[in-house]
Amino acid sequence: MHEASIAKYVLEIVQETIDSDPCCQNKLVKSITFALSRPYTVYPDSFEFYFTELIRDIPQICGTQLIYIDSDQRGFFVSSIDFED
């Protein structure tokens, strides 16, 4: 269930990124890439459920593709946020 609080935190990171960069403010978020290590501390399916619920009414982020890559670094973190051109 801690995936819900992590999803809220990730949304804050995405919104801060958008707000802090004028080039991103009028663009749709195309994808967010997450790096995660094994054993998983965050389960992608559970995280995705909560995150999708949080962003469903945010037009700039709704529909964003979530990508997960394996990492040698321990944990779960945002690797990149990509915007549409």
Image: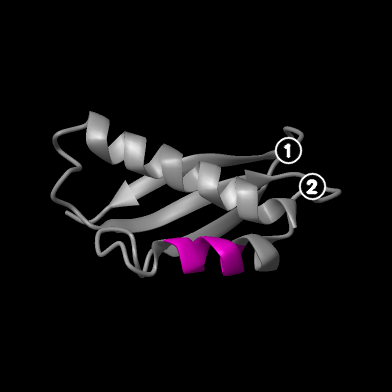
- Disc 1 marks which amino acid? Gly
CA neighbours of label 2 inside 10 A, class few (<14), some (14 to 19), many (20+): few
- What residue range appears in magenta? 48-54
Which residue reaches farthest right? 39
Mark 2 and mark 1 in contact? Answer it, CB < 8 Å. yes
51 on left or right of 40: left
32 on left or right of 28: right
1 shown above or below 35:
below
Give the position of the C terminus as an image quadrant: bottom left
Q: Which residue is mark 1?
A: 75
- Residue at 62% in and 45% down: 35
Residue 63, picture quadrant: bottom left
- How far apart marks 2 and 1 lie (CA) works out to 7 Å
**Magenta stretch secondary structure, dominant:** helix
- Residue at 14% in and 38% down: 23
- Residue at 62% in and 46% down: 6
